[in-house]
Amino acid sequence: MGRAEGRRDFADARRRKRFAKDGLDLKGKPTLVEYGFNAQSKKVTLGNGWLGGVDGDGDGQIDLDHFSPEAAEAHDETVVFRVGSQYFSTRRLTLKRTRS
């Protein structure tokens, strides 16, 4: 599989998922975050699966390219994202509302 095909497969899989998305204040910096959401269990699993990502460069968007540092897929691990010159991971997530 070529690089373009891999990106297309990655993007197609991402489009089929649901996401919990919101803005956070990370040490005074407003930051967009997004996490993969399982509609059946109504949960986000932080250590496994597609996390979505974090807007690390502050442009208001999460770069979802397969090799982007703003997006990640976890495999029994804690993912660490860079936002500016700081590094962050998510320990806990509370879902408070849903939108269609």
Image: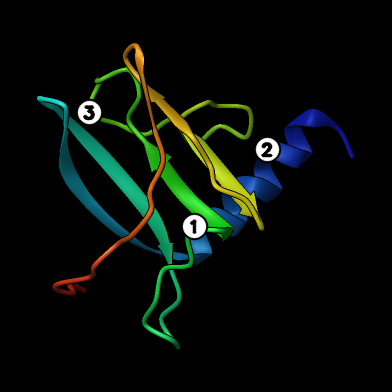
Q: Residue furthest front?
A: 91
Q: Residues within 10 Å of mark 3 (few under 14, many from 20)?
A: some
Q: Quadrant of residue 21?
A: bottom left
Q: Tell me if label 3 and label 2 are in contact, CB under 8 Å.
A: no
On the image, the x and y values in percent for residue 26 come to 19, 32
Q: Is residue 23 above or below residue 68?
A: below
The mark nearer the N terminus, 3 or 2, is 2
Residue 100 placement, left or right of 57: left
Name the residue that disc number 2 marks.
Answer: 7
Mark 3 vs mark 2, foreground winner is: 3
Q: Residue furthest left?
A: 28
> As rendered, which of 83 and 53 lies closer to the eye?
83
Circle number at residue 15: 1
Q: Quadrant of the C terminus?
A: bottom left
Q: Residues within 10 Å of mark 2 (few under 14, many from 20)?
A: some
Residue 71 placement, left or right of 48: left
